Amino acid sequence: MKRRPFKFCKEGIPMFVCLFFGLLSCNQQPKPTDRNSPETTKTVETPKGIISKTQAQELFDNYSNFRVPAIDSLEQQRMPKENFKATRFLSIEYQRLKDYIAYVENEAQLANVPITNFRIYLATYPEKAKFPRRNTLFILPTTTKNGAEFGFFTLPGEGDSRTAVPINASLTKDLGLASGLMDRNEAGIIPSLNSNVLQGGNSLILNDMGNSPPPKSDF
């Protein structure tokens, strides 16, 4: 029986090899585009408030020269046996910050109020805390009603609805928010904070961040 000669492609490659690689190329999946490639990278404009390394260094040095010595001296007088070092920075995990913003956005949406700002309050931990007497901060979202801006928390309503209530109780009546809530206060006494109401509400205040004295710093 005579053997049939191999058929060749134009380049001189046996036909079965051409067919094999042809089928292989048909089954190959397209390579995913690199997420960092120019085709998929979204251009984001530089936000307002970005400062240079030089400016940041100046701010850090001003704090180091004019605030840290006073804090250390004050705390050293309170606790002479303790080598107190002032807090230099606070940190928060990226995902935790995103989760917090998402939580605030959801509560505001359920309460049908806009988020105006995030107020960052400077504060100090008490003596019996994880970081005793160290500087910290907490974040409070604000909304706007009748031209007034105020920090708020939310109260559960029917279903998934919420009612936005000012942290400062003196604003509750003035702004006409959460009508009837002020009737819960006895003898017309208005506390500085809506502490009684807040017990049944949802706080939107964020704290408990990473706290570090020197030398762990980027500056």
Image (spheres, rainbow, N blue to C red):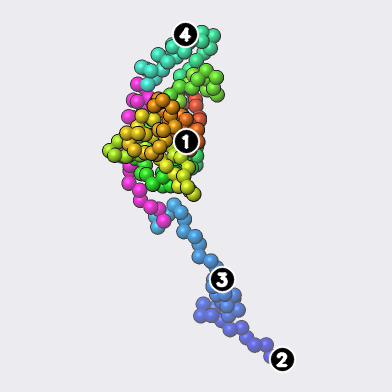
The tag earlier along the polypeptide, 1 or 2, is 2
Q: Earlier in the sequence, mark 2 or mark 3?
A: 2
Q: What residue appears at the point 36 percent right and 29 percent down from the top-left corner?
A: 170
Could you give the CA–CA distance between mark 3 and mark 1, rounded to whole angstroms?
55 Å
Give the labeled residue for mark 4: 77
Residue 112, position as x, y percentages in the image:
38, 47
Q: Which residues are magenta?
A: 40-62
- Give the number of the mark in front: 3 or 1: 1
Label 1 belongs to which residue? 203
Q: Quadrant of the N terminus?
A: bottom right
Q: Which residue is mark 2?
A: 1
Is the residue under label 4 in contact with that under label 1 (CB below 8 Å)? no
Q: Nearer the viewer, mark 2 or mark 4?
A: 4
Tell me which amino acid carries mark 1. Ser
Which quadrant is the C terminus positioned in?
A: top left
Local crowd size for mark 1, using a 10 Å CA cut-off: few (<14), some (14–19), many (≥20): some
Callout 4 amino acid = Gln
Q: Residues within 10 Å of mark 2 (few under 14, many from 20)?
A: few
Is there CB contact under 8 Å for labels 1 and 2?
A: no
Distance (Cα) linking label 2 and label 3: 37 Å
